[in-house]
Every structure is written in structure tokens, then in C-alpha cells.
């Protein structure tokens, strides 16, 4: 059998350097890494981790379920997890549910078939009662999305606070008629944001006009559609909480087309702090979700669960931050 | 053993309906699907496809290797493949290489370990001699990226034509000093685009000023950096071939900041036709890569290879299309 010593000899490097490369430690030069990989290939050496995984039926792989990689929030979350997983010696398999219950169940089978060591759920399409059945096959954790009744580790943002600070900011700009947009209504993330929105309205003794509620709002196209609806209202809102930078960009694009000034005639606040917020004119005020923190902790907790460490009931919650740009602050209205 | 008849009885549906749901045929109502999945869960029924895969060691899974899901071109390509794979009853596992040779090799191990039935490569980080070794473990195809020496099915765009039509468009607007941006220089995709760029210059007896070549250009930030370099040149180019909508958006953002008018003082053409091209002001001229066609054919060819059908040498090539918007056509210069 080919050993790590053979690889070291062939590569002309020390055994410890080879070990550092194989175990993915930092501070090894690219050149040395390439030499090691070349030697491994030439000798047909299978690193211990793979050999070990064959014995233990561990795969050193983690699957992450996300709705769509084209949603920049989830794309960035998966990318951050990828970088973190690599640090722990794990590969990340990205599985899109495409908002389908059926596809979600198929991906959950990865756990059943022992194709992965653990699974991170960033969204949930099926009822929790259905999903939790898969816990008997391997560890799962929740990241971003959450379930009140779930007894698995959860890493999440404080969405109530996010909804609250964004809405309060709009109210402080003098707005009393604020529209509310949301994507999936089943999502607890969305429900908590709404709770924050309602809390801010209550605090300022404002009421919500149900006609100013917009649902299934995910994309730029949805934002354009919503703007057109607002534009036709006899008593339109003067500000919009969008819950999404893409929806905000769509509303602004629609407003430009119809010559409606943002923020003077219509203030718009996004959510996520995606790159697009800085490219639009006006630049979009938004709520930043610090994705790298969430991803780092989620992978750490996942790896712990794979090694049967940590507490099932643990919940990690991260704060969200309001970022004020041009789409909400008009020189006339500004009172902050 | 639980059979499909048991599931049908429990769900209160016909056996053929249950079969249609399990095999993912279209035109079955969500309600019926849910009933079937519920009955399957309750009875612990493992569909034939899973049972079959356990017997044949087939996984009904295809892996796609992409550099980064946050690159909208690759994100969209993976999403289109996901939809196509589902139609063929396959799950797609998305693996990011993050432009790393090492990570690419780790993901290729999926084939060695029989974790997937086949692998689609949309990019290649290692030398082809290294990658081709994995062909002994299972079928691979190339999609988007290509290798002249590779003897595996390849599905690609005609990048030479893409580079040519974009450059010719700039020349026809009166430009003679055209800058060239590119991402990875190793990529054959990039090299073919450059060949098209050079062909157009030759046709009009124009020469390329090496100082107008910009490399490692991938992102919006890179575009801003490139604009600043151009802006400091004593003899700057009047047009830029970017090879990327994001780089184009970055250059336009930089130009706005410094009060340089696009397209009057600097014409900019993107590549991909991403959503961002329609949101920027000016809207970005670009070259459309019809991703869904590429994804559809790639999945079809992959499934064929898994079933040992098709010819290893086959190459499918799709044309690219020039889309003219505001970032290249100034009312003064327009001669087309």
C-alpha cells in the first residue's frame, strides 16, 4: 500500500508538509500543494481521510439545501459555507429545492442513503413533521429558516429586529402609509420580519392598510409589477418595505419608467445589502444580513453535530443592521 | 415489503397516479402529490428508483462542477441544469471549485467514490491530463469550457463569434482604440473570445495596444479598478470589450463617479446578458449566451453517457447573439 512517506519522498517534501496539505492546513504554498497532489496522483495514493471515510462510511461531505442559488442571499450563504466547510476538511454539496416539496424530499434522501454526513437546511418547504423524520438517518441543523417546534441546532438572524429598524426608519422620515411586500408567507423568517414591521407601526400608533400588502414578491420583475399596482392606487403608500433588494430594485426601475421620484414621491427600503443596492441610482437603503457570520457558525455547529458534540436545543441569533442610502432619505423629509 | 399497491391504497389513488408521482411525470396536481408522499412516508416505502439504485449502485445523481455560484453566468447555468435534470429523474449536486485545483480534485472524487452517476464540468482548473484520469471511474462531459484534446462529449457556445460580433459592433461605432478585459487566461472560453476580438480588429486593419489589455477581470470591483486605470492613461481607449456584464457595470459605475460619460467618452460592452444590464443607467449592450439551450443539451448528453449511449467525440456548439443597448451607441457616433 502506498503510504504518506512514499508521497513525501516522491514530492521531495517532508512528511509533515504532505500531512499539512492533505489535511488542508493554512500556510502551505501553492507550489508545494501542487507537488503533493502530483505525487499523490502518480502513486495513486488515497489520503487517510478518504480511507477513513470508507471504513466508517463517513463521506466528509455536508449537503446544504437552499431554495435557489440565483437568489443572491442564498447564493452568498452557500458560498460562505463552502469556504468554511473547506476549513474543516468538508466538501459542500449544494442542493436547490426550487421551492418544491418533492425536490426537497429527494435531497433529504442524501442523508438516508448516507451520501452525506450531515445536512444544513436554509429553508423548509415541507411541514416540519415530514422533515424531522429524516433526523433518524443523520444530523440536520437549521440555518436562516427556523421552526419554533424544532429541537435541532438553529443559527438565525433576528428578523423581528430587522423588520422593526427598517420600518421605524421609514416612519422617522415622516411616512404614515407604508406598504409591505413579502415572499413566501409560510416562512418563519418572513413572519418574524412582519412582526417587526407591526411593532414599529404600533409604537407610532399607525395602522396598516391591507390594500398595501403585496405577496409573492421575490424578483425584480415582481418589484416592477408591485410599482405598477401602487401607481394605480387612488390612495397610494408613500413608502415600501420590500423585504428584498431585488424587489426594491424592481420598484425603483418601475418608478423611473413612470417618472415617479424615489425617494421624494415613494421611499423604498430593501433587505440583504446585495451589490445591486450600490449600483442603482438612487442607491438603495437596506438591512444588512451579515451572511459570513451565519455561515461560519452554521458549519461549526454542523461539524460538531456530526461528531455528536453540542446541544440539540442551541439557538444562535445574529443582529441585523440598517444601512441608510438614497432610496429612503429625501432632503425635504429627512428628520433623523 | 411495502409495494406501490399499498401506497396507492393508503393514498386513495390509482396505482398509475402513484407511479406518475414517483417517476416525476408532469400534470399531477400538488394535492395528489402530497397524498402520495404522505402515504409513502407513513408506510416507509422506498420508491423503485431508490431500490434500483441500491442494487445497481446507481445514485440517480449528477454532479456539476462550477467555479462559483455567485457568478451569475454559472449560477444560471446550474439552475437551468437543475430543471433539466429533474425532468430526466436525476438530482443535481452543485459543487463549487472556487477556482481551486485542490477543491476541483476533491469534487472529482465523487465520481471515484460512486457518489454520483456522472459529472458535468463547466470549468477546468487542473491540467486536462490530471482531470481525464477520472474518466476511468465514470462518465464526464464538458459544458461551456472545452479542451481541444478532450475526447469526451462537449456542449459549448461559439465564443469566437461572440468576441467577433461584440468587437465589430464597437468598431462600427467609430472606435479604433478598444481595450480588452478578460478573467482567467488559461480558459479556452477566454482564448476563443480573444481570437474573435483579434479577428474583428484584423478585418478593419486595426492594431491592439497592449497597454489596453486588462486581466483578472471578474467582478464589479474589478471593473471600477479598470476604469480608474483607463482614466489615468495619457492615450486612453474610447471603448472597452469587457467579457463580463459585471465588469461592464463596474466600469460604468466608475465612470459615473468621475463624471465620464458612457457611451460618449467611453463605450462599454458586456457579456452574458444578465439582469444587471437592464437595470444600469445607461443600459448595457452585451452578448447573450442562451444558457437554457446549453443546459438542456448538456443534461441530455450526460444522461445518454450514463446509459452508455452517444458518441464520445460529439461536440455541440451554440451561437451567441449581440444585444445593442445604450452603453455603446451614442447619438453622435452611431453609424450602424
Image (tube, coloured by chain):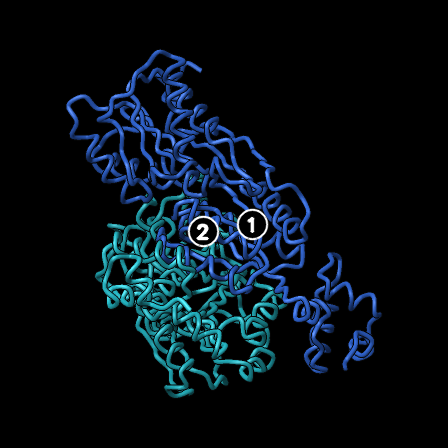
Chain colours: A blue, B cyan
Residue lying at the far top of the rendered structure: A205
Q: Residue at x 42, y 58 (%)?
A: B75
Location of the N terminus of chain A (image quadrant): bottom right
Q: Residue at x 27, y 29 (%)?
A: A213
Q: Classify mark 2: helix, strand or loop.
A: strand
**Figure disc tally:** 2
Residue A44 location, quadrant: bottom right
Q: Which percent across, then down, holds residue B303?
A: 38, 77
Give the mark, 1 or 2, whose residue is nearer the N terminus. 2
Q: Residues within 10 Å of mark 2 (few under 14, many from 20)?
A: many
Q: Which percent across, then down, holds residue B314?
A: 38, 85
Residue nearest the viewer, comparing A294 with B208: A294
- Pointers 1 and 2 in contact (C-beta within 8 Å): no
Q: Is residue B231 visible?
A: no
Q: Is residue A151 visible?
A: yes
Q: Residue at x 33, y 43 (%)?
A: A218
Examine the rendered structure and indicate whether residue B75 appears above or below residue A34. above
The residue to which callout 2 is attached is A66
Location of the C terminus of chain A (image quadrant): top left
Please, which chain is the residue tagged with disc 1 on?
Answer: A
Q: Residues within 10 Å of mark 1 (few under 14, many from 20)?
A: some
The residue to which callout 1 is attached is A80
Q: Classify mark 1: helix, strand or loop.
A: helix
Please, which chain is the residue tagged with disc 2 on?
Answer: A
Examine the rendered structure and indicate whether residue A51 appears above or below residue A274. below
Examine the rendered structure and indicate whether residue A80 appears above or below residue B335. above
Amino acid at each position: 500500500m502506498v503510504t504518506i512517506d512514499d508521497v513525501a519522498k516522491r514530492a521531495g517534501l517532508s512528511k509533515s508538509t504532505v500531512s499539512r496539505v492533505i489535511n488542508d492546513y493554512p500556510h502551505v504554498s501553492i507550489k508545494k500543494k501542487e507537488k503533493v497532489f502530483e505525487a499523490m496522483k502518480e502513486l495513486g495514493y488515497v489520503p487517510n481521510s478518504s480511507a477513513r471515510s470508507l471504513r466508517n462510511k463517513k463521506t466528509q461531505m455536508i449537503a446544504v439545501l437552499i431554495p435557489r442559488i440565483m437568489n443572491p442571499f442564498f447564493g452568498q450563504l452557500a458560498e460562505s459555507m463552502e469556504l468554511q466547510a473547506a476549513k474543516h476538511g468538508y466538501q459542500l454539496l449544494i442542493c436547490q429545492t426550487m421551492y418544491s416539496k418533492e425536490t426537497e424530499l429527494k435531497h433529504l434522501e442524501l442523508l438516508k442513503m448516507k451520501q452525506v454526513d450531515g445536512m444544513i437546511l436554509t429553508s423548509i418547504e415541507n411541514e416540519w413533521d415530514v422533515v424531522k423524520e429524516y433526523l433518524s438517518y443523520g444530523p440536520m441543523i437549521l440555518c436562516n429558516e427556523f421552526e419554533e417546534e424544532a429541537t435541532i441546532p438553529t443559527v438565525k438572524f433576528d428578523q423581528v429586529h430587522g423588520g422593526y429598524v427598517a420600518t421605524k426608519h421609514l416612519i422617522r422620515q415622516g411616512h404614515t402609509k407604508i406598504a409591505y411586500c413579502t415572499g413566501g408567507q409560510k416562512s418563519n423568517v418572513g413572519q418574524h420580519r412582519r412582526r417587526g414591521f407591526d411593532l414599529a407601526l404600533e409604537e407610532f400608533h399607525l395602522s396598516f392598510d391591507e390594500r398595501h400588502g403585496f405577496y409573492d414578491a421575490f424578483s425584480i420583475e415582481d418589484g416592477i409589477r408591485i410599482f405598477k399596482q401602487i401607481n394605480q392606487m387612488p390612495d397610494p403608500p408613500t413608502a415600501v418595505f420590500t423585504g428584498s433588494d431585488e424587489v426594491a430594485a424592481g420598484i425603483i426601475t418601475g418608478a423611473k419608467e413612470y417618472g415617479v421620484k424615489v425617494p421624494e414621491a415613494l421611499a423604498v427600503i430593501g433587505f440583504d445589502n446585495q451589490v445591486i443596492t450600490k449600483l442603482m441610482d438612487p442607491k438603495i437603503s437596506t438591512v444588512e444580513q451579515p451572511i459570513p457570520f451565519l455561515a461560519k457558525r452554521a458549519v461549526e455547529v454542523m461539524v460538531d453535530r456530526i461528531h455528536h458534540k453540542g446541544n440539540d436545543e442551541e439557538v444562535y441569533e445574529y443582529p441585523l443592521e440598517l444601512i441608510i442610502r438614497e432610496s429612503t432619505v429625501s432632503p425635504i423629509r429627512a428628520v433623523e
